[in-house]
Amino acid sequence: MTKQYAIDMAKKLFRETNKSYYVIFEPDSNEYSIIDQDEFTKNAGEWNNLVIFSIEG
């Protein structure tokens, strides 16, 4: 997924659920992914440096 699409989707998900979402860059695949707060806290140390956008509720 492209960077802008991932950011827009994270904003949309936030508006629908009022939960925190993070867009992370996966350098191995050159793709962007969206993860929610629960998943982020499980692996925060691993993903902390890969976050390019966050929207928190």
Image (cartoon, rainbow, N blue to C red):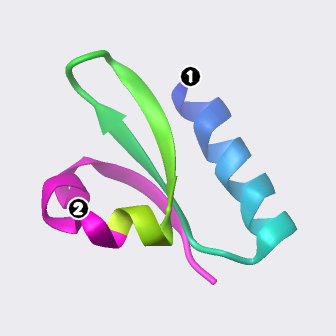
Q: Is residue 51 above or below residue 44?
A: above
Quarter assignment of residue 38: bottom left
Mark carried by residue 1: 1
Residue holding disc 2: 43
Please name the residue shown 29% across and 31% down the image: 26
Q: In the image, what residue type sits under mark 1?
A: Met
Task: State which region is magenta.
Answer: 41-57
Query: Quick one: 4 or 17, which is closer to the camera?
Result: 17
Question: x, y percentage for residue 22?
Answer: 48, 58
Question: x, y percentage for residue 42?
Answer: 28, 68
- Quadrant for the N terminus in the image: top right
* SS at circle 2: loop
Which residue lies most toward the top here?
A: 29
Membership of 44 in magenta stretch: yes
Q: Nearer the viewer, mark 2 or mark 1?
A: 2
Mark carried by residue 41: none
Q: Closer to the N terminus: mark 2 or mark 1?
A: 1
